Image (cartoon, rainbow, N blue to C red):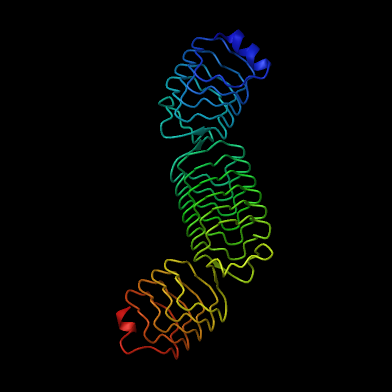
């Protein structure tokens, strides 16, 4: 394909130019936004002053390509070879790259405001709306306040990622891995979370209105204050999920019948499986936690005043600074429990039980 053929096809609406050979082509000042040049060859081509915003060059060769004053905003440069390319005054704001992208030796994409798509990436306030990130590994990435509206996150790994207050309206998160992800305060309205894995995810204060959670796993997820009034929960697994009085479920939906636990004063949590659950700052005044399993649970600063924890398992639990005054802890297992700064005034304890902690 030559430059003339390319421009003719683009003009009639064609956008898929995967694998084309345009090496040495003169494409100066062309206007080709949102085209797909996956695995294309642009080596030694002249693309100076071209508008290529939103264009995909995934796995393409741009070696020795002239990109002087070229607009590559929001372009996809993952696995792209840009070695020895001329990037003078090139606009790479919001362009995507990964650890396999090759830039000229003296070029820093971070300084050019491009986004590194990789585990542990810092992408606070990043604008990634409509981006195709399907199958990407963004585990433990920092995406606080990021805009992922209508993005394609099909099968993405966001395990332990921080998406607090992120915008994910109408995003496609089908089969996404969100285990231990922080989605507190995020906007997931109209999003597709079908068969997503949300085990231990923090969904506190999250907007889930009109969200499709069909077949999703919400095992031990935190739903404090979440808005699920118009969410689809067909076959969703809420076993061990926690919610409070502010959580809003669809009319007629019984979260307790689905295995979720109401957390609050006077809560009935006998034999509850709360292993590894985060309950920091929770108000469990007078709650019945007889025989509950709180192994490795985080109860930092929780109010357990006058609660019943008879025979409860608190092995390796973090109870730092919690209010345990007048709490019944007889028969409780406190091996490895962190009770530093906890208030145990008038608590009922077995002899030597605190010494085990």
Numbered circles on residues, count: 0
* Residue that appears at 50% across and 82% down: 288
Q: Nearer the viewer, residue 48 or 277?
A: 277
Q: Is residue 303 left or right of residue 34?
A: left
Q: Is residue 254 left or right of residue 41?
A: right
> Is the N terminus in the top left, top right, bottom left or bottom right quadrant?
top right
| x and y, in percent, of residue 323 in the image | 48, 81
| x and y, in percent, of residue 233 in the image | 60, 57
- In the picture shown, does residue 34 fall above or below 247? above
| x and y, in percent, of residue 38 in the image | 51, 23
* Residue that appears at 54% across and 53% down: 215
Q: Is residue 38 left or right of residue 313?
A: right
Q: Is residue 331 left or right of residue 156?
A: left
* Residue that appears at 61% across and 21% down: 15
> Is the C terminus in the top left, top right, bottom left or bottom right quadrant?
bottom left
- In the picture shown, does residue 233 fall above or below 90? below
| x and y, in percent, of residue 208 in the image | 63, 55
Q: Nearer the viewer, residue 99 or 215?
A: 215
């Amino acid at each position: 394909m030559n430059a003339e053929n390319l421009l003719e096809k683009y003009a009639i609406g064609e956008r898929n130019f995967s694998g084309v050979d345009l090496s040495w082509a003169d494409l100066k000042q062309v206007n080709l936004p949102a085209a797909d040049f996956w695995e294309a060859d642009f080596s030694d081509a002249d693309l100076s002053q071209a508008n290529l915003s939103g264009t995909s060059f995934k796995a393409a060769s741009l070696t020795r390509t002239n990109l002087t004053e070229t607009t590559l905003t929001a372009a996809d440069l993952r696995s792209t070879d840009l070695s020895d390319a001329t990037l003078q005054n090139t606009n790479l704001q919001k362009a995507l790259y990964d650890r396999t992208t090759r830039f000229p030796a003296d070029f820093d994409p971070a300084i050019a405001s491009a986004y590194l798509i990789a585990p542990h990436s810092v992408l606070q306030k990043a604008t990634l709306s409509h981006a195709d990130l399907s199958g990407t590994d963004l585990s433990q990435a920092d995406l606080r306040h990021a805009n992922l509206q209508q993005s394609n996150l099909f099968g993405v790994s966001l395990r332990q990622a921080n998406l607090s207050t992120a915008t994910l309206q109408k995003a496609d998160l089908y089969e996404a891995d969100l285990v231990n992800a922080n989605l507190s305060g995020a906007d997931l309205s109209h999003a597709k979370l079908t068969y997503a894995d949300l085990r231990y995810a923090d969904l506190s204060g999250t907007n889930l209105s009109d969200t499709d959670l069909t077949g999703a796993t919400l095992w031990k997820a935190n739903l404090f204050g979440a808005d699920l009034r118009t969410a689809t929960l067909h076959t969703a697994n809420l076993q061990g999920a926690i919610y409070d009085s502010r959580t809003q479920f669809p009319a007629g939906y019984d979260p307790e019948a689905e295995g979720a636990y109401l957390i609050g004063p006077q809560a009935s949590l006998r034999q509850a499986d709360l292993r590894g659950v985060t309950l920091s700052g929770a108000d469990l005044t007078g709650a019945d936690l007889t025989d509950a399993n709180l192994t490795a649970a985080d109860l930092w600063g929780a109010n357990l005043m006058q609660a019943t924890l008879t025979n409860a398992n608190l092995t390796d639990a973090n109870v730092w600074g919690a209010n345990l005054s007048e709490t019944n802890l007889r028969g409780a297992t406190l091996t490895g429990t962190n009770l530093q700064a906890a208030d145990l005034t008038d608590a009922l304890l077995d002899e030597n039980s605190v010494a085990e902690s």
